[in-house]
Image (cartoon, grey):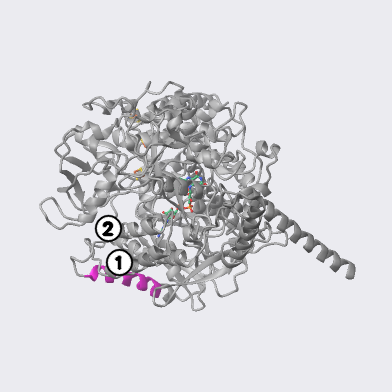
Amino acid sequence: MSESTDQSNGKSPGSSQPKDTNKEGIPPKSPHGQGDHGDVSNKVKEKPKSLYIRILRQDSPEDASYWERHTITYEPELNMTTVLQRVAAQAKTADGKDVTPVAYDVNCLEEICGSCTMLINGRVRQACSTLVDNLLQENAEEIVLEPMSKFPVIRDLFVDRSRMFHALKKIQGWINVDGYWDAGEGPKQSPAEQQDRYPLSQCMTCGCCLEACPQYTKIEVERGEGESDEAYEDRCREAYSKGFLGAAAISQVVLFNLHPTGKMRAGERLDALSSEGGLQVCGNAQNCVSVCPKSIPLTTSIGRAGRATTVHAIKRFFGF
Amino acid sequence: MAEQRVVVVGGGLAGLAATMKLAELGIPVDLMSMVPVKRSHSVCAQGGINSVNNVTRQQGDTEWKHFDDTVYGGDFLNHQPPCKEMAEWAPRIIDLLDRLGVPFNRTGEGFRDQRRFGGTLYKRTAFAGATTGQQLLYALDEQVRRWEVEGLVKKYEFWDFLGPVLDDNGVCKGCIGQDMVTMETKAFPADAVILATGGCGLIFGRSTMSMACTGSAASRAFQAGAKYANGEFIQVHPTAIPGTDKLRLMSESARGEGGRVWVPRKAHDERDPRDIPEAERYYFLEERYPEYGNLVPRDIATREIFSICTESGLSVEKGKLCVYLDLTHLPKDTLNKKLGGILEIYEKFQGVDPREVPMKIFPAVHYSMGGLWADYERTASGNLLEGSPRNQMTSIEAMYAIGEVDYHYHGGNRLGANSLLSCIFTGLFIGPTIKNFLENLPKGTSASDMEPSLYEEATKKYQAIDDELKARPAGGENPYLLHQQMGEIMTKNCTVVRHNENLKKAYDEMCELEERAKKCSLSDTGNYTNQNLQFTRSFLDMFPLAKTILKGALLRDECRGSHYKPEFAMPSLESEDEDERLREAETWCDRFEENTKKWLKSTIAEYGEDGEPIITYEDVDTSLIPPRPRLYGLKGAEIIMQVWNARMAKQSNQADSKTEEAVSSS
Ligand SMILES: Cc1cc2nc3c(=O)[nH]c(=O)nc-3n(C[C@H](O)[C@H](O)[C@H](O)COP(=O)(O)OP(=O)(O)OC[C@H]3O[C@@H](n4cnc5c(N)ncnc54)[C@H](O)[C@@H]3O)c2cc1C
Ligand code: SF4
Ligand code: SF4
Ligand code: FES
């Protein structure tokens, strides 16, 4: 469970758990465990000797994807980044064929940097915080890994999420300070204001919410023959700015517009939300909020942003 | 003259702070990072960032005391002028972060809240939930994005720094990077290169650090001629959660908020910890260090936890070394508000709720106090001369080092919550330094004046390294497995307790491993997103630093900060007789003074022609606060301090009368 939710809405722990949806089929956990992982070591009665991992690979954006099966020795307390490390180290398929190590994106290993997002048994999540013992509950036969489907594949499980960073530019996701010299303290803020902003500020640009969103569709810009980096980037930027911003960026607008200084530019951010690919694309499917690993209240943010945009539009219409 | 550019390598707190400051000064920056900067290791920091503040000030705290805590905590191996400057900047830095929108926790009245961290008696640490590093990194990342939109910053993410480009005079004129996706190797001409590439925890296999903390950039700079200093000073954090791929940190803030460390008095007591009555619990830190309790400085806490498990055999579990870190007596509401993020980590990775059950923790490699040697220019009053081009410059001219990869701020041991500070401080402070450096660059020596061949040749040189790796016959040694072995050698011999015998053996083992590593072969010889090649290259670059760390540790025959050799530990006072104890204290102080003379020196390593590190020593500027014994928990500490203070008083009287004489005779 996440304290960020508790902080944002003041509910007691356990009152709102988007991750509950993932608990299906997991037997009751140890008396003291409260997290959705329970006392993992006790859950699986029969430990397998080996793990089978089926991975959807792709050598490059131009190549077709293909499945490959790997196996490693089971150990207690394995997480999926350890599994991927072992798979890379052995560089052999389950039937002994030499292959290249599987490419993937990783850094922190503690679900805070957002790098290692992928589809694990069909569900989008971080490899580092996904524990093998829990996966065996979902499917004891094998673990299935696929790259996220909403972003262009670079190689294997490694995808290109630069579109997310473009979205942060479009919404002007920063506080416009006058300069970095000493100008005394920041504006005074109540604990309630801090607790409103803090959860939103935990967004690690991981992309889970976008993967789950029916309105967010993949944009893949193919590189032209001999096209320069700059020209290619320009075309990407253009394509991205027409596409849907997605829940993460919308929620960031709320984050910055809540800040006493950030507010001063609220209108510009709301303009970005009203432009092509903005808030109006959202179909309110609410898939985003249920997959966010940081339990960010995304639909609440979308609602707030929606109301603010409407008010902003009316004010503009009447020339306030 | 063509536009002058600067390359910043690394987009953690230090690199981002430097980038935004340079952009503000109008200097265009190429920002290169192995990972998207927003995913840099700084995101992991949990606890907070230190500064004197309005509350502590009224309790008698000052910038000077923060400075004093920093150098005392560092066992006086820190250079004092930079630390003094940093402590003075600290309140302004927190103010700036506050203005940038960091959601610092608030008091009821709406001020920033602070907590207490190890090694100080004041609540100096500002924090944002339990994800302070993430919040600070994001604030700076946002500012850099703003400058990116303005066109002053160009990001090169998923790029690996391969090494500096040096002209005939050994001056840095840019660097070589490799696109980790397309594998293109490219030269970045620049008039200054700033390395902000963080620590080197991966040399120890598993640590609290992230996968990008390979130390590869520092090693490549070292191999190109930069000096590396105090390598042997590696901080081992007292409290981490042992895991198969990483030892996940349990922040000091858990103790800061009242967490208590204990073991059952009976070894491997199998009862549920909650059923063990108070009387049968051994709160060993509180008993041994009544003043600081659970908040003794890191090196002490680490050693105590380590020795209670190994020497005293009181580990909670039989097969695995660990002690309890207990929060269960604290109100859940407070825990959720103040420690939410880190408790979540424990729960997520261990499947147990730390609000209900005491956590099991053990020390883990955490921070590199040492790093690239870097210069500074001091003023008469002991501050830094702001804007001096020498500040933070490595021994290679025009190449700078900031953040965890520099060496002079944390001495023998870093205080908790001082690193985020040193990263942001050095990042901001380097702005005017670079500006002046660029403005004073002699005509005709700019990167844009260089012959293109300088860059072509350097690019070729680094491409040749890849070509050689790819040409190796298949079926050789496996780099991933050898890396594990490297980690085992380092962790076993060169962490909490160090013995010369073991260090010697470890050095030989490391040399053997290096020979085997020369026969590593790649399982991917392709030219596209080749992570296998990239990892193997970083792994090979770990050897020069691993050997520097081992050799530095072997040669340093003393105990200082994190570097602990029982053979050279200073004794407790044993005698019960008062006079005898006084004599013991005098001898103790003599020995301390001797040791200070001999060993209060930075270890300086240079990369020898044969690839072996050459070690020399260099004086440390301790002119502002004279080194004094660090006596946490030593038996007889009060008497030693008395004797010591008497000596100091005498010395300063003598010094005073000398100056008086000088004055009266002139
Ligand atoms: C778990 C944890 C918790 C911590 N908590 C605290 C705390 O509460 N308070 C505190 O003060 N300190 C804390 N620290 C220490 C502090 O977080 C780090 O020292 C600090 O963040 C380092 O920042 P940095 O900018 O120097 O480097 P990093 O954040 O490590 O960034 C390094 C950058 O360099 C890049 N890089 C590295 N090598 C290369 C290469 N070869 N080519 C290109 N780019 C490269 C990386 O991609 C990255 O962008 C903690 C550390 C850990 C491990
Ligand atoms: S609520 Fe909007 S953003 Fe969220 S999943 Fe649905 S359509 Fe996507
Ligand atoms: S909102 Fe949640 S799911 Fe979406 S990118 Fe941020 S952290 Fe990931
Ligand atoms: S590696 Fe950072 S989130 Fe998984």
Output the chain of dot 1.
Answer: B
Dominant SS of magenta comes to helix
- The image quadrant where one finds the C terminus of chain B is bottom right
In the image, the segment drawn in magenta is: B456-472
x%, y% of residue A313? 49, 26
- Compared across the picture, whether B491 is left or right of A40 comes to right
Q: Position of residue A193 (x, y in %)?
A: 54, 28
Residue B283 numbered mark, or none:
none
Residue at x-position 62% and y-position 57%: B584
The one of B52 and B398 positioned closer to us in this rendering: B52
| Image-quarter location of ligand 3 | top left
Looking at the rendered structure, the secondary structure element under dot 1 is: helix
Mark 2 residue type: Tyr
Q: Is residue B151 visible?
A: no
* Mark 2 closeness class: few <14, some 14–19, many ≥20 residues within 10 Å: some
Q: Is residue B458 magenta?
A: yes
A24 sits to left or right of A5: left
Instruction: Please report whichever mark, 2 or 1, sits nearer to the chain's N-terminal start.
Output: 2
- What kind of residue is marked 1? Leu
- On screen, residue B92 above or below B191: above
Residue under circle 1? B513
Image position, residue A21 (x, y; %): 28, 26
Which image quarter: residue B377?
A: bottom right
Query: Looking at the image, which residue sits at the far left?
Result: A95
Q: Is mark 1 within 8 Å of ligand 1?
A: no
**Dot 2: what SS?**
helix
Same chain for mark 2 and mark 1? The answer is yes
Is B388 placed left or right of B147 in the picture?
Answer: right
The answer for how far apart the CA atoms under marks 2 and 1 are is 13 Å
Q: Is residue B520 visible?
A: yes
